Image (cartoon, grey):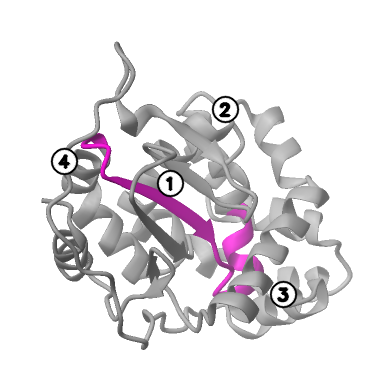
Amino acid sequence: MRIKTLISTTLAVLALAACSGGDTAGAPKGEPIAKIAAPAGTAWVDVVSKTEFGGYKMGNPDAPLKLVEYGAITCPGCAQFAVQASEELHEIVNSGRVSMEFRPFLVHGIQDVPGFLLAQCSGPEAFFPLTDQLYAEQPSWLGKISTVTEADQQAMQKMSPEQIATLLGTKMGLIEFVKSRGISEDQAKACLSDKAAIDALIKTTERGTKDDGVTGTPFFILNGAKLDASSWNQVKTKLIEAGAR
């Protein structure tokens, strides 16, 4: 998925397309796994690192069950999953049995770029809290995509991806959103103008499509097996069957 494709997708689809989960069944099954204690004075949910795949992993790095989600920040299904999963998923991650890796996927092209750039603006430790907050308030900021005018769309055809990300971040109120969460306007604009970060998001999306067969979001993988699941209850069932109990 090249930059030109991302731009044309944005110009053609300023109304949201549908997003959906994976369509391939399969998941590991196993005996109950004993809890694994975090280092003294810490909780596994606070152990977060950026991965070689362009994602962010939360939890025990050596957890026997490794859950991966490909998600789009503008995907309503992803937002619903995040809201439903938050509390119970954190409990499961804190057991040490399961790690959770989130990999950004640009299912709606460059529309997804500003939110992801700002979610990772304060480093790995802030990625999950910011992403959860963006999902929780998605209808509010995403609805502002309607403020992108025809004149804006015409101008975007001559803009760089960084300029488009900054324009969309401003129009959608995302800069103001993160300003109230400890990220200054200058810092936000610097993150939105980070070409290397945009290229990395594209690479993660391309890899997800090519190597993992991602066709929509949310899309889940558990220990290398694609899950036929899109809701938290479905994913939780797979985790329990695999031994997170």
Instruction: Say above or below: 10 vs 187.
Output: below
Q: Earlier in the sequence, mark 2 or mark 3?
A: 3
Amino acid carrying mark 1 in the image: Thr
In the drawing, what numbered circle is on residue 6? Answer: 3
Residues drawn in magenta: 94-114
* Residue 184 seen anywhere in this rendered image of the structure: yes
> Residues at badges 3 and 4 in contact (C-beta under 8 Å)?
no
Alpha-carbon span between mark 4 and mark 1:
30 Å
Q: Look at mark 1 in the image and give the residue it sits on.
A: 131
> The disc labelled 4 sits on which kind of residue?
Ala
Under tag 1, what secondary structure?
helix
Q: Nearer the viewer, residue 158 or 132?
A: 132
Foreground of the two, 7 or 100: 100
Estimate how packed mark 2 is, as few (under 14), some (14 to 19) or many (20 or more) residues with alpha carbons within 10 Å: some
Q: Nearer the viewer, mark 3 or mark 4?
A: 4
Residue 99 appears left or right of 118 = left
Q: Which mark is residue 183?
A: 2
Residue 80 lies left or right of residue 236; in this view the side is right
Q: Of discs 4 and 1, which sits in the foreground?
A: 4
